[in-house]
Amino acid sequence: MKGEHTLNLCNNCGAVLPDDEQDVCPVCGAEQRTGSQKNEKVIKNKTSKAPKVLLIIAAVLAVLLAAACIATTVLYNKYNLNDAYDAIGKALLDNDIKTLQKYVVGDGVEVTGDNLQVLCNAFAAESDVKTLVTQLKQQAAGETSSVRYSALTAVNEKVFLGYSAYKMQAKAVSMRVPADVTNPLLTVNGASHTGEVQADGVVYGGLFPGLYSCVLTAESGTGSRITGTETPLSLLDSAAPTVFNGALPIATITVSECISDDAVISVDGKQLEQHPSGHVVTIEKVPVGATISMQYLTAYGATTTANVQFTDINQTQLAFANHVTEGGIPEEAQLNSLLGAYYASYLDCINNQDITKLLSSTPLNAERLTPDMSTADHKANLYVFTSAACQYGSVGQGEFETKPSITCNVEFKFTYSNRETKAEAEGTLRQTCELVFNYEAAAWQVNRVSACPDEAWAAGTLGTVE
């Protein structure tokens, strides 16, 4: 048959015998049986085993491909950035500390259950969680957008085959108490913290990002310790310390209506070094509840005092309004001398019809006397001062428009003569005279004068000043 040929094969091992009449196999040495396998036919190009091998290989590849697809799906689901950060957001809202421990890594801070609880406290609002999750997804995708929470950033850990485990990195945060707060002591979540003194204040660092309850104690301007209001403070910015002034009930205040720029000012009984300027005093670091006092010793030894209490942190413009003057009544001789100078100048003003020459008088008194200057009697007569003496036992103290005052009965004597007839006569007036202390002039001045009834004079009691 075309395409066929015969081979002589060994009966024992099947090796091809080079000679058709070979009796012994050169390979195995077995004797050959004549004609037993000499005419076996081997068909050239007969069907081989290759297709079966290919089928097996294809099956194996199919299985591997299916396994690869399944593995790819599993890995995609496990290491998907959207799913990872959504899981972080859900864990924050649910206070799921166990889940967060799988996703949060620390940078300079330790990831503990307590610290993660502080972090959860800062993200109790769903809107804040959404903002954080969006930020993390953008960072993981390589987008450069504005960052609201710089202490929390997206990071990934390479796993294999290009896959990464997406996590959130927490960086250390800090707070700063400003330099104008004196000797601060900070308590965070009930624990005292020690800070580092810097040029711009005291910095407290090494805190895990989150929401803290902070209480600050500091020193007022007079040295007393003041405790601020317990304040919730979110520390989520690692770029710079969060400034915390402690919600201290301390403020710089101004107090007006100081009687004199030489007045002594005290806060809660502690005398200050500064004095008023323009009857206003500015005081730093005054605690709410403090009492600010003013004391001024007059030229005549009278002591004028006043005080005001600082009660509202939002109302720092205060004024003394309860001035009280005690002591310092001029001696009788001094008072008589002052009254004599006043009444003598008063008569000179009448004689000259010019009230501007009036001495030891307030503008109010001069204004009240002006209509009386040009009466017919005053124009017709020439007046000469004789004497003025106070009824010293009647002297009383008071106040006129926040200024200290004294009031006394006065007997004023004079002579007068008619300018035409030259007829002379004597005159006596009994008046109740009010004097106020002029701080600018450092002297008592007559402020108001009224007639003193005979019965008041006889009784040694003050008449009414109108």
Image: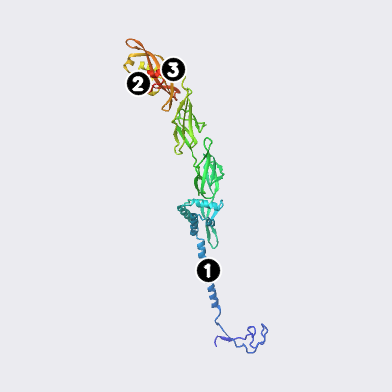
Q: Where in the figure is residue 321, as x and y percent of width and height?
A: 43, 31
Is the image coloured rainbow, by chain, by secondary structure, or in one colour? rainbow
Three-letter amino acid code of the residue under disc 1: Ala
Can I make out residue 240 in this image? no
Q: Nearer the viewer, residue 117 or 254?
A: 117
Residue of label 3 = 336
Q: Quadrant of residue 462?
A: top left
* Precedes in sequence: disc 2 or disc 1: 1
Q: Which mark is residue 370?
A: 2
Discs 2, 1 touching: Cβ within 8 Å:
no
Q: Where in the figure is residue 164, as x and y percent of width and height?
A: 53, 60
The C terminus sits in image quarter: top left
Q: Is residue 242 left or right of residue 461?
A: right
**Which of the two marks, 2 or 3, is nearer to us in this view?**
3
Q: Reply above or below: 426 against 111.
A: above
The N terminus sits in image quarter: bottom right
Q: Nearer the viewer, residue 348 or 427?
A: 427
Three-letter amino acid code of the residue under disc 2: Thr
Helix, strand or loop status at disc 2: helix
Helix, strand or loop status at disc 1: helix
Three-letter amino acid code of the residue under disc 3: Asn
**Alpha carbon of mark 2 to alpha carbon of mark 1: how far?**
117 Å
Residue of label 1 = 67
* Precedes in sequence: disc 2 or disc 3: 3
Helix, strand or loop status at disc 3: helix
Discs 2, 3 touching: Cβ within 8 Å:
no
* Precedes in sequence: disc 3 or disc 1: 1
Q: Where in the figure is residue 379, as x and y percent of width and height?
A: 33, 15
